[in-house]
Amino acid sequence: MAKSNEKITMKGNPLRVEGRCLEEGCQLPQFRLVGTDMAEATNAAFAGKVVVVMTIPSIDTPVCATEARRFNQEASSLSGDVVVLGVSRDLPFALKRWCGAEGVSRVVPLSDHKHRAFGRDFGVELPDLGLLARAVFVADRAGKVVHVDYVPEIAEEPDYGAAIKAVRACL
């Protein structure tokens, strides 16, 4: 688990990452994303909830698919006061198709394909690839970030246990 976005790699090769590194104790940045229904989604839609934000390069890759399934499974054992957001640059149509085919219903798939500000705001922008780095953030009901995990190797999964522990501490 890494608290910094300074040394992110893909298959061992360093990647250029843009955006500020989020830190525990800061407010979750404001965001504007697109849902699978093409409607805008912002922080306001999740106010008062414990929010898990998982950022992934693409839902159509094995590690990202595994991560989405795992967070979906974990979320099913948590209260309705917890929302898991899965954010990528995938088109909303692809996210909807994948989630439907996989039966993923507890992860809210959101796309940054339109506005492209999320990546920099969360410190996960991979400008040379046009994708988002893999990371997990947990914010409490007031929107304060209580867990940060910039996954150092984007081909690896995050520390699910640490993220879920942070969620449970907020309930």
Image (tube, rainbow, N blue to C red):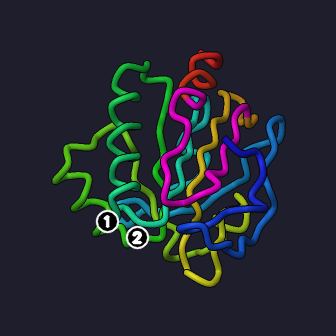
Query: Mark 1: which secondary structure?
Result: loop
Quarter holding the C terminus? top right
Q: x%, y% of residue 125?
A: 66, 70
Is residue 47 or residue 98 the one in the foreground? 98
Determine contact: label 2, label 1, CB under 8 Å: yes
Res 9 quadrant in image: bottom right
Q: Which residue is mark 2?
A: 90
Cα separation, mark 2 vs mark 1, equals 9 Å
Is residue 136 in view? yes
Res 148 quadrant in image: top right
How many C-alpha atoms fall within 10 Å of the one at disc 2: few (<14), some, or many (≥20)?
many
Q: Which residues are magenta?
A: 146-163
Indicate the amino acid at tag 2. Asp
Q: Which residue is mark 1?
A: 60
* Between discs 2 and 1, the one toward the N terminus: 1
How many C-alpha atoms fall within 10 Å of the one at disc 1: few (<14), some, or many (≥20)?
few
